[in-house]
Image: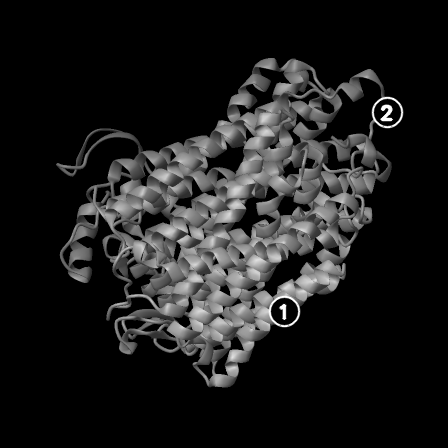
Amino acid sequence: MDILELARLQFASTTIFHYFFVPVSIGLVFIIAIMQTMYVVKKQDIYMKMTKFWGTLFLINFAVGIVTGILQEFQFGMNWSTYSRFVGDVFGPSLAIEGLLAFFMESTFIGIWIFGADRLSKRLHLTSIWLVSIGTILSAFWILSANAFMQNPVGYEFADGRAQMNDFVAILTNPHLWVQFPHVLFSAFATGAFLIAGISAWKLIKKQDVAMFKKSFRVAVVVGTIAAFLVMIFGHSQAQLLIKEQPMKLAAAEALWNTSGDPAPFTLVANIDSEEKTNHFEIQIPYMLSLLSYNKFSGQVEGMNQLQEQYEAKYGPGDYIPPVKTVFWSFRIMVFTGTIMFLLALYGWYASRKGILEQKTRYLKLMLFGISLPFIGNTAGWIMTEMGRQPWVVFGMMKTEDAVSPSVTANEVLFSLISFTTIYTILAGVTIYLFVKHIKKTDQKTESNDKVVDPFDKEANNIVTQ
Amino acid sequence: MSLNELWFLLIAILFIGFFVLEGFDFGVGTVSRFLGKDDVERRVYINTIGPFWDANEVWLITAGGAMFAAFPHWYATMFSGFYIPLVFMLLALIIRGVAFEFRSKVENPKWRTTWDWAIFIGSFLPPILWGVVLTNFMTGMPIDGNKEMVGGFLQFLHPFALLGGVMFLLLTVVHGLQFITLRTEGELQERARKLAKKLAPITLIAFLAFLGIGWYTTDIFTQHGNAWILLPVFAWLSLLGASVFNVKRFDKRAFTLTSFSIIFLTASIFIGMFPRVMISTLGAANDLTIFSAASGAYTLKLMSYFSLTLLPFVLGYQIWSYYVFRKRLKKSEHLEY
């Protein structure tokens, strides 16, 4: 493999791995902050117990998210130095502001939250977890402002052979950012919600700590239903934006080789032949693509062959068609998992309101497996959006093949790829082990007597030692 | 002051902040495995930096982001040029970061020992690598006309750079030990004080040798006139003063002086580089400077507004967090989280 392939493989693998943990952190800390708020408002110890239980999972997860995130920031300079030189002016500020505004806040207040329980008032301790939550959300916003620039570059001019920022407001109001950010944010909330709901479901099947996990489940499905619904809404607006910004990505997601008829049908499944540039078999739903693209039952959608011709005329000779099968199927996997998540969460909300949740063991079992859904959906979504942009690294501006570091050798990248893959594999194993261990732990104290020791109380200090 | 100069200053401040703050938690992480005789003692040592290490590391992440934004060429040349050392540093920071969190989660002694070693390696390696990088900042690196570093990574490991690595490790260890004397009491505190005393002579000698070779072989310490030599001299004297205060049990003063030693040393290197950000050994025409490596004026101005508004808040709540955790740690305290 050459350096370009290795560097791309490294970016894809480390980013996908990093993004297993990030949405869990964003989602969990938001829900934990809600739980702790309920504790402070309602003054019931059960909410503190919930905060503690999910807090432990959050902290294990958060640590992995942080350390794998440092690599992300360094990777641009290490493997993609030409890219960094070319767009640093526009791309760098997002990362710097993310550090100043978000990382400092979340890292300082997470320390205060963990170690400050017996040194701070309840309200201040609660404030610190909310600041961590806000920090994770701000972090998502700023890194997505950088990604939105790669998808739909705005607010720059070319000077001295580089893209230079000339309009920060344009970068902040990038239409792409304002559909991508909510889409990603709510999918992160849904991810945290499904983790809590799934684990709670398992505990309810096992009949352990029923009161606490029923409450946890309820909070999670409420957040999960609302979040999954909003993910679909903003996903839909993203598709409508795509038809203007990156019609090639949308055409690839539809495996639409030639411009559609009017109204345009939606292709449900297809046997794609990228060599011949045609599909051998398709199942289509009439009108549906027009509806998705324009919110009406008419309108044409341009095909890849036609777009390829336009792009050649505009950007010069080259292959502008992304890997169609990957984009087509990852799009379907994302939409499918998102829809199932919404339905599962909605039913869970209904069942827990009706008080029939515990009888529905089959549903509870389903929810345990449902934990995997947001992870599959998130990964598929990023694969679709990043692969669908190829061959560009910054759409219409710089190709991925031109972005790698010229001074770095393939062997060096191979070395780092092997090192990070090894250590990430170990991390994944250890994290799953610790998660399972923590989840399996039963709370003896609550089952033997009713008095719950609040681990965040001053008197409990010496009890919990070792 | 031009915006290019301001940004050079801000990045220098971010690196100084990183070295002073993460410096002591690197030091604590390096010694906790050996200074703590049993699990509880190691936990106490680790907990001295527990609430802080994560935020300290953000100084590095923000320095990286600021370089990316303000001097993209500096960021690109340095990060692609120091490829292999950075791979090792990232590996170290990764295992260290998770080790702090994972260590307490299982009671098995083998588990704890494994993560204690991870904390040790992860805290021991980065200061050495940063010492090597800083020394190469001083000597310059082979940067060609395309702003690319050439010649592979073995060239960074010349004897002077290795001395720089060892010196920087020793400095962070002493700095970390002084931090322990501030955050612990009794036997645990005494042990740190004793080790700091033991390490003082060798650290002072390594530091002096480093400054001497630096003065003899590079232009860094006298770039802007001979009077600037006072800065590295103050760095050394601060360390000397710290070791005296350590023996006399003035812990606060000792820690303040090890901090100043790192501040003076880092400042003198950055000042010596100025207005260059990376010195080329292939001719001064290839040097990256605060002008040739910089972003456009618009970005620099925007970033100035952002950072000058946000930095006071960051400093405010970080200082507050040190105030919250000012009490000394005891063995009998709630240690597991």
Q: Which residue is mark 2?
A: A451
Mark 2 vs mark 1: give the one in front: 1
Q: Which residue is mark 1?
A: B238
**Do marks 2 and 1 both belong to one polypeptide chain?**
no
* Residue A466 tag number: none
The quarter holding residue A349 reads top right
Toward the viewer: B139 or A173?
B139
Tell me if mark 2 has few (under 14), some (14-19) or many (20+) residues whose alpha carbon lies within 10 angstroms of its own.
few
Tell me if mark 1 has few (under 14), some (14-19) or many (20+) residues whose alpha carbon lies within 10 angstroms of its own.
many
Residue drawn 35% across the image and 50% down it: B84
Amino acid type at mark 1: Ser
Q: Name the side, left or right, on which B34 lies relative to B221.
A: right
Q: Position of residue B241 (x, y in %)?
A: 67, 67
Q: Compared to A3, does B164 lie above or below?
A: below
Is residue A449 visible in the rendered structure shown here? yes
Quarter containing the C terminus of chain B: top right
Q: Position of residue B173 (x, y in %)?
A: 59, 53
- Whole-angstrom CA distance, mark 2 to mark 1, is 55 Å
Q: Position of residue A419 (x, y in %)?
A: 37, 39
Q: Name the side, left or right, on which B212 lies relative to B146.
A: right
Is residue A138 visible in the rendered structure shown here? no
Amino acid type at mark 2: Lys
Toward the viewer: A260 or B300?
B300
Label 1, secondary structure: give it.
Answer: helix
In the rendered structure, the residue with mark 1 lies on which chain? B
Toward the viewer: A169 or B237?
B237
In the rendered structure, the residue with mark 2 lies on which chain? A
Q: Position of residue A221 (x, y in %)?
A: 62, 31
Q: How is the image coloured?
A: one colour
